[in-house]
Image (spheres, helix red, strand yellow):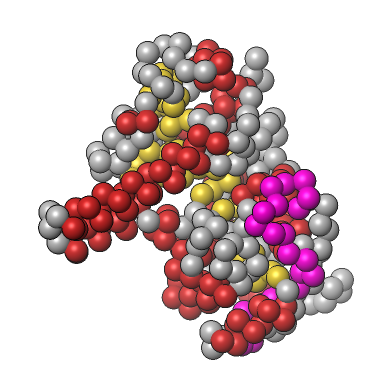
Amino acid sequence: MDPGQDAAPGAGPVPGQRIPARERDVMSRRVVVDAMGGDHGPAQVVRGAVEAWREHGVPVILVGRSGAVRGELARAGAAGEIDVAHAADVVPMTERGAGAVRMACSNLAVGFDLLRAGAGAAFVSAGSTGAVVACAVDRLGTAPAVLRPALAVALPTTAGGATVLVDAGATVDPTPEMIAQFALLGASYAQVVLGVSDPRVGLLSIGAEPGKGNRLTRRAETLLRGMPLRFHGNVEGGDVLTGAVDVIVTDGFTGNVVLKNVEGTVRAAITLAAAQGVAGSAELGRVARRYDPETHGGAALLGLTRTVVVAHGSSRAATIARACVVARDLAEGEVVARLGDRLAIRPVS
């Protein structure tokens, strides 16, 4: 496929068409990028994709309304440099799920179809999380026995390592059984990605004592005590960044609030410290970068059959570029397959 040529959604190459082995390899390693998703798409998304390709060597294909996408490529000085797959419809940021699934020619549908057909190794979107999750489940499917997918984010801790927060926003209204599976997904992610041999898992609640929390949390705690993992018990909000556990599991509603609260609190603390002259701008900048979405790029959507990374809706070019790098690394590390190998997910009752 020539650079800049519109890629047809669906089953990939035209039947009978001979594609050089090197080009087939590049196509299969590409990151499929939703050019229309996010608060600043396609302008910032396209620039981020260009940066991912030029600065980090990540092969990408952009999905969206080809006229708008090509216009942004031209403005970025990258006309003809990156492939574009046309999608006639755009899933709005206000869409939360079912409506997106019904849009057969949307940016998400076309992107996931490319991924399923093997025209790419991973998918990145800064679009509505609910819509991305719903379309991913519909188009790609979940891994065997997985009830619902979950978003995982590795948050830096004061102890120097990282804690995996799961679910960070994929399933806002889960059952206790789903939360128990999220714990297994998070623990496996910590093993595969962070190299933690025997991750400690904590359940986020309003108190560390057994039996604390609402009905959902109390039932999830009971299930977790019988799961094949190292369950630490309940943890509180103040434990999120201390490294008390390697994985913190919660429902997607609470997890997303926690994630955004951490980011906002860090920004506020740094602003206050700067105003008081507590530390220099260089030192404060290093702390800020540890928790900036630009640093972690996005959250891995666990429990699917393919690699999907969801970026912040407010993502700008640098964050999109980082999300592409994360998606490339997860795909090259075969994290989805390795999670499947490690997960002998048992029926939860």
User: Does residue 163 sit above or below 91 in this rendering?
Assistant: above
Residue at 48% in and 75% down: 51
Residue 35 on image: x %, y %: 63, 69
Specify the quadrant that holds the C terminus.
top right
Residue at 37% in and 31% down: 237
Q: Main secondary structure of the magenta part?
A: loop
User: Does residue 71 sit above or below 129 in this rendering?
Assistant: below
Residue 213 on image: x %, y %: 47, 18
Viewer can see residue 321 = no
Residue 284 in which image quadrant: bottom left
Most foreground residue, 114 or 214: 214
Q: Please state the extent of the stretch shown in magenta in the rendering.
A: 79-101
Most foreground residue, 277 or 285: 277
Most foreground residue, 241 or 307: 241
Furthest toward the right, the residue is 15
Residue 144 on image: x %, y %: 70, 34
Residue 294 in which image quadrant: bottom left
User: Does residue 68 sit above or below 232 in this rendering?
Assistant: below
Residue at 72% in and 78% down: 66
Residue at 69% in and 69% down: 63
Residue 85 in the figure: left or right of residue 31: right
Specify the quadrant that holds the N terminus.
bottom right
Most foreground residue, 293 or 149: 293
Residue 17 in the figure: left or right of residue 19: right
Residue 27 on image: x %, y %: 66, 69
Viewer can see residue 200 = yes
Q: How many marks?
A: 0
Magenta segment: does it hold 290? no
